[in-house]
Amino acid sequence: MGATLLGPVGESESMWAQAARLTAALIGFAERWLAPLLFLAIRLWMASIFFRSGLLKIEDLDGAIFLFTAVHPVPFVPPWLAAYLATAIELLCSTLLAVGLAARFAALPMLAMALVIQFVVGANDPAFYQTEHYYWMFLLALIVTKGPGRLSLDHLLAQRLGHS
């Protein structure tokens, strides 16, 4: 009986069984070590996009209100309210998302904003109808449905509180 990186190998173990064990080991490695890094990268990427947009708005709130008045109005929402809500969501939710605290809840309004940008504003102004928004929606929906991953404050708090 021989041995491999995956443990002992019997003489009768087929090449297919060895391949299956290797595949299972690689998947386990990816789930344990690569997935948390991927979720962290997704959170940081989405957070940076929204945070930078929020900073631009807060630096010039009058300009942001003008944008929501004349350039890309949001139906049924007064421009001043749209500007303040967008700024607050972009700054607060992106910060929470970056550190992974209440990440699922933080990603929800960001997802809603991406939907509005793509399907409401984009329907009225083709300049805002961009494929990139679909990436944002899919990545934010991933955080909403699967959580922020192991490299997050949510995960750390869940471990401290005895939850999985």
Image (tube, rainbow, N blue to C red):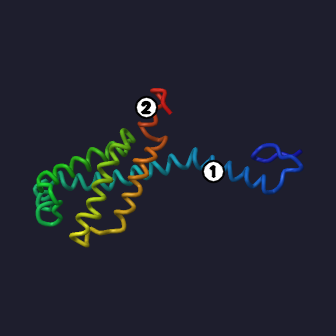
Query: 10 Å neighbourhood of mark 1: few (<14), some, or many (≥20)?
Result: few
User: Which of the pair 108/63 is nearer the observer?
Assistant: 108
Residue under the image location 47 percent in, 41 percent down? 151
Name above or below for residue 20 compared with residue 92: below
User: Which of the pair 62/115 is nearer the observer?
Assistant: 115
User: Which of the pair 17/132 is nearer the observer?
Assistant: 17
* Position of residue 143 in the picture relative to residue 25 (left or right): left
Name above or below for residue 154 compared with residue 54: above
Q: Amino acid at mark 2?
A: Leu
Would you identify the image quadrant in which residue 129 lies? bottom left
Query: x, y percentage for residue 95?
Result: 31, 44
Q: Amino acid at mark 1?
A: Ile
Would you identify the image quadrant in which residue 71 lies? bottom left
Query: x, y percentage for residue 19?
Result: 75, 55
Q: What residue is shown with label 1?
A: 27
Residue at the top extreme, as displayed = 161
Point out which mark residue 151 bears: none
Query: x, y percentage for residue 59?
Result: 17, 53
Residue at the bottom extreme, as displayed = 126
Element carrying mark 1: helix
Point out which mark residue 157 bears: 2
Residue under the image location 30 percent in, 59 percent down? 115
Whether tag 1 and tag 2 are in contact, CB under 8 A, the answer is no
Label 1 vs 2, first from the N-terminus? 1
* Position of residue 63 in the picture relative to residue 161 (left or right): left
